Amino acid sequence: MPADRLGGKSLLTAFTALPGGTQLTSILHPRDPEEASIHWVAQEIREHLDSVRVALDGLHAEMVNASEKRRRAARERHAHRQGVKLQKFSEGDFVLAATATGRSGNKLALVWRGPKRIVRALNDFTFEVQDIVQPFEMSVRHASRLQLYRDARRGQVDKLQEQANYGEGGHLVEALRECRLSPDSHRYEIFVKWYGLDDVESSWEPADSIKQDVPQLFHAFLDAAPHDKLRSDMATALASPTSSSTDVPRLPRRRTAGRRQHQRAPTT
């Protein structure tokens, strides 16, 4: 018999260089008085395996067709629902991609990250998207988990990359509204409008963090009002190498209306 360790050669061939063979020349049927050769048995086995392979391929094709029909019917039912319409995307579009972070009740909790670029359309509903910052990772997303990035047309590549870097934290900066000197921390803050959130959800963020995360937007905010004294003072304070420890003008602390001031009686 051929041996694997001998490269498929039989022991007889390996030691004597003679062609190998088998001592079994025929097989008797256990019940009928019939005799079958080894070659006939091998041929019957091959034909049986071929027929089994054809049957399995046909079964798998039927299962794939049935599954595709069910998916197509589900997509058609979803598309005919009132108010449900998937957005059309094309290669080269800048989009935001949603990532599920868990569930809130019966609904998925999604976090939108990006912008990313669509590099290939796998079909009408699935797209291959790529990060626009290193390491330029690729991922496959469904159209229901994508939305167009509306500022991509007027945004430059460096600004889009900054947005992508900052957006990995979970939110995108849409605009910088105004700045102030915080009455509590006595540090400069910027009022940030977040992409995808309502105006009432805008928040005051530390100016040094905004400058570090989105410097292009920060400098554009300063250039928009070059004669604004508060913005100029903020830029001067943050330009200092020790801006984190630079003393800034302190504002008087706010007092709660109706709060009574107690004075300690002098001791005698």
Image: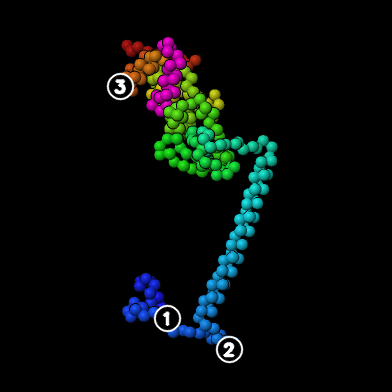
Residue beneath disc 3: 241
Q: Residue furthest front?
A: 18
**What secondary structure is marked by label 3?**
loop
Horizontal and vertical percent position of residue 106: 59, 42
Q: What residue type is labelled 2?
A: Pro
Q: In this view, does 67 lie above or below 221?
A: below
Residue 169 appears in view: no
Give left or right: position of 82 versus 100.
Answer: right
- Residue bounds of the magenta highlight: 211-230
Name the residue rendered at 38%, 26% in the picture.
212
Q: Main secondary structure of the magenta part?
A: helix
Give the Cα distance between marks 3 and 2.
102 Å
Residue beneath disc 2: 33
Give the Cα distance between marks 1 and 3.
88 Å
**What secondary structure is marked by label 1?**
loop
Name the residue rendered at 57%, 66% in the picture.
53
Horizontal and vertical percent position of residue 128: 51, 42
Label 1 neighbour load within 10 Å: few <14, some 14-19, many 20+: few
Q: In which quarter of the image is residue 189?
A: top left
Q: Which of marks 3 and 2 is nearer the N terminus?
A: 2
Q: Which of marks 1 and 3 is nearer the N terminus?
A: 1
Q: What residue type is labelled 3?
A: Pro
